[in-house]
Image (cartoon, rainbow, N blue to C red):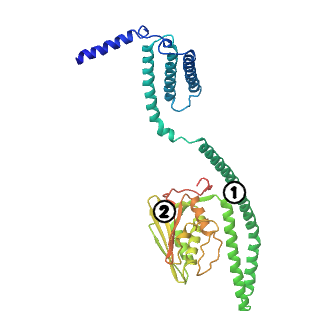
Amino acid sequence: MAIKKQEGILGQAADFFSNIFSTEYWPARWHCGKWTDFHGWLYIISDVMIWAAYFAIPFLLFRMITKRTDLPFPKIFWLFIAFILLCGLTHLIDAVIFWWPAYRLSAVIRFVAGVVSLFTVYALYKILPVVFTFRTAKQLEAEIEQRKKAEEEARILVIENDKAKELLRVKDEFINLASHELKTPLTSIRGYLQIIQMKSLKSDPQNRDLITKATNQTAKLTNLINDLFNVSKMQMGLQPLEKSEINLNELINELAADFETLNRHVSVEADEEVIIVVDRDRIKKVLENLLENAFKYSKADSEVILRVRKVNDRIKVSIQDYGLGIGDDKIQHVFERYYRVEHTSQNYSGMGLGLYICAQIINQHGGVIGVESQLGKGSIFWFELPYQPTQNLSIETYSSDES
């Protein structure tokens, strides 16, 4: 019986589709039931209006997706076009049935419309998570406003930065000019003081002491002006390096002997002879500044250890003292221009240029400089330079840009 029933259904389907346009079993809708003219035409006109709208909407959607190819989810638009067209067609057929009772054709169109509708629902469900991530017009406007504000702030920062650079350039030019102009009278003053000192050897000891103090203060002022002059030249790129091969051990031993006094003790720990290519005067200046710094912040009769080591393809020089040390909050600033480490227990002279000059010179040589310190236990200032074995180079001049 089940097979016969199935054959019956298949037969019905075959008969259905073979006579899909047949109307012989149904009367026109005007003759089915009791329709007044008003009721019938109200029904027909309503269906026709719905069909007209359902036809126009897909047309507009088609125009939209063909003109704007950047719209998201184009497949969804095509599904909506098919779904709306089929829904409109069901309303058109419903109106036509008043004269042409094509109920079989109407059923097929309704079924196809139902299938397409379900596919459209599924497709919409799949894209909902993505749609929920879209920003609203208000959010986009707020973002645009934030970007405009950020761009304006960036523009102001650029202007302020340019102004700061210009002020820094003017200041460096002034320092360069002022220090240059001050060097000549200071040299004359030192000369006059030396002459007075020589002539007053047998004079009142108090006068000799005052002259000595004046000479020492003049020497400090000269060193300060030289530092300012060197810093301004570095900033303006007017100090090229004059590199040559030097024996680093000899230079270090020479400086250790110069700094060794009754109250100052320098210990040297060095590897075998080290020959490097550097600007001798500049590296000597670095070592002098670091040694002077080590003794300045150490107690009298203290020892400073100067070490030289080969580390792979670099030479590492370190100066260790057992002085006051530097706090963690200050150590990151010690190589900045005009920065001075303030100690509550004592006040030390200086403008905060020595370590800055050291850092600039080491950077010019392609090296690195750093410090390790513990408050109350001392510091280790170190720098590393590229190691180049003996090459018998004659003296060459390098600009800071090439180093």
Q: Is there a contact, CB below 8 Å, between mark 1 and mark 2? A: no
Who is closer to the viewer here, 36 or 160?
36
Q: Is residue 393 above or below residue 117?
A: below
The quadrant of the picture occupied by the N terminus is top left
Q: Earlier along the polypeptide chain: callout 1 or callout 2?
A: 1
Front of the two marks 1 and 2: 1
> Whole-percent x and y of residue 45?
57, 18
Tell me where residue 213 sits by quadrant: bottom right
- Residue type marked 2: Ile
Question: Secondary structure beneath disc 2?
Answer: strand
Q: Nearer the viewer, residue 302 or 141?
A: 141
Query: Is 136 displayed left or right of 197 in the figure?
Result: left
Q: Secondary structure at mark 1?
A: helix
Label 2: few (<14), some (14–19) or many (≥20) C-alpha neighbours in 10 Å:
many
Q: Position of residue 236 (x, y in %)?
A: 68, 58
Task: Give me the residue at 40% from left, 9% from top.
Answer: 19
Viewer-nearest residue: 17 or 318? 17
Quarter holding the C terminus is bottom right
The residue labelled by disc 1 is 165
The quarter of the displayed image where residue 353 is located = bottom right
- Disc 1 packing (10 Å; few <14; some 14–19; many ≥20): few
In this rendered view, identify the residue nearer to me: 204 or 384: 384
Q: Badge 2 is on which residue?
A: 315
